[in-house]
Amino acid sequence: MDRLATTGVTLTSYYTAPSCTPARAALMTGRYPHKVGMGCDGVGSFLINSKYGLGLEHQLMPEVFREAGYVTHMVGKWNLGHFSDSHLPHRRGFETFLGYNGDEETYYSHHAFGISPVYNSSFCDFVYCDSAVGVRFGDCQDGDYSTDVYAKRVLELLRVHDDSNQTSPLFLYVAWQAVHSPLEDPPDMTMSVAQQEMISDLALLNVTGDEDRRTTFARMLMYLDLGVKSIIDELDELKQMSNTVVVVASDNGGCPSEGGNNYPLRGSKFTQFQGGVNVPAFIFSPLLSDAAQGSTYTGMFHVTDWLPTLANAAGLSGLTRNMQLDGIDLWNSLNQVGLDETGAVQPARAELVLHLNAWEFPRDATDMSVRATLVNASLVAGSIIVNGTWKLIVGEEYSDVFSPDSDSGTDGCEMMPEPDAVYLFDLATDPSEATNLANDTAHAAVLAEVMAALMREYTSQGSASVTWRNSDDAAFDVWSAAGNFVVPWNSTDAEPVSPMDEPPEKPIEAKPVSPADAPTAMDSSATLIDEDDDEPQDVEAALEEGKYHDGR
């Protein structure tokens, strides 16, 4: 991934949501999570047995590409709702899906976290879905490390596509499990000298009890890098790389208690501080302009921007023009088109909403009219960046900066609500958010401006549905009857689910929603989601320089 990043475009001001489900909702819809009912992201908001789901009224990224004649597949982590068949990937624009539905599971046995209070058993969260034949389950791939399982599936899809669909372009979304809790060492691998030195440096920095987490995290990331490399090598072998766009991005910041580290940024996953939302990302493609290749884009880039940006890269901007997106098309900016008189890239984004959790208080208010009478604006957790530098955070307890050489074993990831808390930071001079300017009279006008911007966003969301739901123990009955597999359990859903012996080697063909002439500019669009940092570093030197930044 280092090689891809240094020869592509590195996004230094890339922003995402504070946790998995809202980030994925934003990626798939091109809209802010709170606008599609997926803004509530406190710990436990989206449980494996909760009836949550990204609203079916929203058009998703794969549907846009499929409408244009693309073959669409997904591999890995879904996490956008699975209580009914209608919410699964094969009903949301993907022709096939192999992976898991929930937020976290084991890497070798593929069992979701949690024990059924009725059956006292764990459940396998691993399914194959096909738009032609529905949901198939029964093979949990027990003993196979998930990075290997997903890399193998991607290679199969690339080879089948090359053999049977040479005139059709490909959209492939790979949502890797790594690196996410629970930490599990990968199979043995050959490490480079630089990787061995990184492991040694981490062992030196770690305090008692923390070494296993940090070094295990690093080995898992290195193994993920091998999985990405196998995909890039296959694209080269198939002579498809010249027409491919590859995106690699984290979905949220790291958890110190799970081996991650966001130093020198403040905060962690689930928080609105920079450590939770400003994460590593890059785009690589031979289709990028000569000026763009090997460059760094410092303008703000939000996870919602991928949909319109990739649509433009594929010549499909017309399909997204009427979608009321929050995302901005940054393809020209990334390619350094439209430079100013000094030769600098003009940032296309001046403002972005990082988070707006209007459902934090109270959680059970799913009716919008009821919620409006119960939710006090002073209890809303939210954050916004205005004019590219002024960042406002409200409703959250002040977070720490977690140094790599401190004991972070008890520092869990969660957003701690704090009613009436207000923070104002100047990111241009204070990227670690050390100085709160909210009470500084010299910045009263700035505070009023950014607060007004956030409140405008909050008050404009009267029509958004709330998709957060309490856990539903009825799921356990259905899963138990299915041989302890996580499957859709909505009793009103008529879509059949049935066991599978093995996923088919060749995906069953499914016609595009609306066949169209495939754009010749791009035969393959691969979107790769890497949940954590991608750059091995000299840890001791970086720590001394205050630049250590990993585990995202």
Image (cartoon, rainbow, N blue to C red):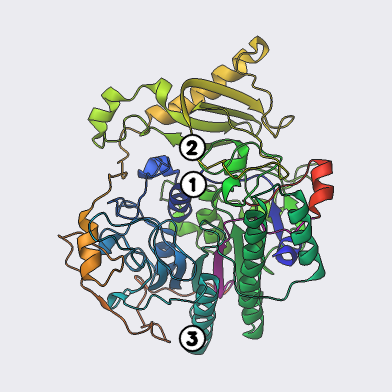
Query: Relative to 460, does residue 183 appear above or below in the rendering?
Result: below
What's under tag 2, amino acid-wise? His
Query: Which residue is depicted at the point 64% across and 63% down?
Result: 221
Residue designated by label 3: 160
What's under tag 3, amino acid-wise? Val
Residue designated by label 2: 355
Q: Secondary structure at mark 1?
A: loop
User: In the image shown, does 134 or 36 lie closer to the viewer?
Assistant: 134
Query: Relative to 509, does residue 303 appear above or below in the rendering?
Result: above
The quarter of the displayed image where residue 67 is located: bottom left
Disc 3 from disc 2: Cα separation: 40 Å
The quarter of the displayed image where residue 188 is located: bottom right
Disc 1 from disc 2: Cα separation: 10 Å
- Circles 3, 2 touching at the beta carbon (< 8 Å): no
Residue designated by label 1: 19
Disc 1 from disc 3: Cα separation: 34 Å
- Mark closer to the chain start, 1 or 3: 1
Per the rendered image, the range of residues in magenta is 521-537
Marks 1, 3: nearer the viewer: 1
* Residue 359 in the figure: left or right of residue 22: left
Q: Secondary structure at mark 2?
A: strand
Residue 69 in percent (x, y) is at: 43, 73
User: In the image shown, does 266 or 288 lie closer to the viewer?
Assistant: 266
